[in-house]
Image: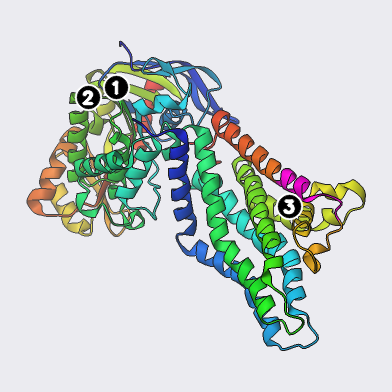
Amino acid sequence: MSSVLVADNATKRYGEVLGLNGFSANLAPGITALIGPNGAGKSTLFRLVIGQLKLDSGSLSVLDRPVDADSAMYREIGYCPENPSVYGWMTPFEFVSYLLRIDGFPRSEAHARATRSLHQVGLTSVSHRPLRGFSKGMRQRVKVAQAMSHDPRMLLLDEPLNGLDPVGRVEMMDLFRQLAAEGRHLLVSSHVLYEVERLTEQVVIIANGRAVAEGAIHQLREAIDAHPHSVFLRTPEPRRLATLLARWDHVTALEFPEPDAVVARTRAPEEFYRSIPELVVNERVPVLEMHSPDDNLEAVFRFLAE
Amino acid sequence: MPNGPVARAGVVAVATLRGALAGWRSLGLGLLAASYPLIVVAIGAGKLSNVDLLAASESIFSVLFIPVILLMVSLVLGVGLFRGEMEDDTLVYPMSRSLPRGALVLGKYVGYVLAAIVVLLPSALVGLAVGVAMNVGPQVSLDGLLPGVLLMTVLAILAYGAFFLFLGLLTRQALVIGLIYGFLWEAFVPLLPGPLKELSLVYYLRAAGAGLVSGGPLASSSAPVSLGASVAVLVGFSGACTVLAALYVRYAEVRPGAAPA
């Protein structure tokens, strides 16, 4: 198999708004990062693959089969949506077991697989608590667990690191690497390049519904590094965290947009993302959430789109 | 050996039943359903010697329970089957699985029917039982009423639920349209002259009830439709709405109104 996902001029409109605008790409086996700002068309692409949306024109195939040909093909695909919604009245164990059982697994096997998947994402101890009380990060883990629970050949992960704390991000990226090492293909979307480049060299940049660049990540770095990068960190100790971050040479500015949050601007995002887990562990400063507002990447995407 | 589509639809039905009966919404629906026996008890407790409580409970069943209470419960539960999940964006989970779309629709519909029966049937039976027990007139048995009441309740749950399930797929305004349908169309179309009244579901529901009840208000339907024909129309309507819903989920888009990024 030379390509795991082939898109040829795939177009999807929402009335006057273009979700995908002639998107063409050939994704090689392994892990591929789909990078683009919010509204670029990443989620539209995923929802076309799972059949929730229908193409207006062009073609899209996954694992050598056209999408939405029949529901049986979804046995080969695992999907982790971006939205944090889950069935709040279920426990993680019930949620994953339910999805496995509607996939056709007998009850005993569904239970065994659910237990294993929840263990892999580190949720064994809370697997019988109702999901309605879960944080965004814990829900993210549950969504990843259900996506991989049926051992699909291809995983579609839409912003899977959103809402996770720094240590959780490292754990989740280790899990993704492990899944790829087992022979699975992963398409991971993100609006944070520095995050996914630690997962893979293969990248597709999407902007305004089109694939504007495709290939090795290091070729795109120069253009992207020229732009300052901001990182949002939620913490109950924002002043202390800011003091620690101010010691780093590459941090050029610190802001407090909310009482329990810090936004740091950095000239060296790669080093920032590499160092933050170490800071959290060594200095015992709790960071509950970390993400990058994507406005600082807009200029890069516009540049590439031109 | 993977389970077949019917077994998988059964799993969906059980989950739908649990989801429908979880949370505050089910409590509200239960209270709404309980208003029927409470009204009958209130009339009985008033000790109005000139009121035939059994006839009153039958009348309230026919003009309040079926076209208002049952319709409202069916509307909330039926629309919520897909529209609720589309708006919550949880429909992506079953949609991204190998479950055939028809089995998804069937499972949700069966789950709805079970949930609606759990919420509505006890109230219907208790309301009529109170009417029989507290009746100060000639003593009658519930046996003569029971088949008609059961049939009307189950047929109404089947027909209204299938319609509201399909409506919930088609539009975000399903609740509003459903209310207009319930309180205007179903209320006034049966009053129209000639064959126009046959365009309402309640016309066939009353005819079905009258076909099984020998006396009293429930037997007084003037519809010249036989029991068999009424049941066939209502079951056929339910089946047609369910099949259309399955085709819609298979071939059309089922997404919230806002476009995904």
CA separation in Å, label 1 and label 2: 8 Å
Q: Where's residue A192, x and y in %?
A: 29, 34
Name which residue lies at 37% across and 44% down: A98
- B233 with respect to B241 (left or right): right
Toward the viewer: B14 or A258? B14
Name which residue lies at 72% across and 75% down: B140
Q: Which residue is mark 2?
A: A200
| Chain to which the residue tagged by mark 2 belongs | A
Residue A208 shows in this picture: no
Residue A133's image quarter? bottom left
Within 10 Å of disc 2 (Cα), the crowding (few <14, some 14-19, many 20+) is some
As drawn, A139 above or below B135? above
Amino acid carrying mark 1 in the image:
Val
Within 10 Å of disc 3 (Cα), the crowding (few <14, some 14-19, many 20+) is some
Q: Where's residue B86, x and y in %?
A: 51, 43
Q: Helix, strand or loop at disc 3?
A: helix
Residue contact between numbered discs 1 and 2, judged by CB atoms under 8 Å: yes
Q: Quadrant of the N terminus of chain B?
A: top left
As drawn, B217 above or below A19? below
Amino acid carrying mark 2 in the image:
Thr
Mark 3 or 1: the one toward you:
3
CA separation in Å, label 3 and label 2: 55 Å
Q: Main secondary structure of the magenta part?
A: helix
Magenta-colored span:
B223-234
Q: Which residue is mark 3?
A: B181
- B42 with respect to A6 (left or right): right
Q: Which residue is mark 1?
A: A203
Name which residue lies at 83% across and 59% down: B221
| Chain to which the residue tagged by mark 1 belongs | A
Q: Helix, strand or loop at disc 2?
A: loop
Q: Quadrant of the C terminus of chain B?
A: top left
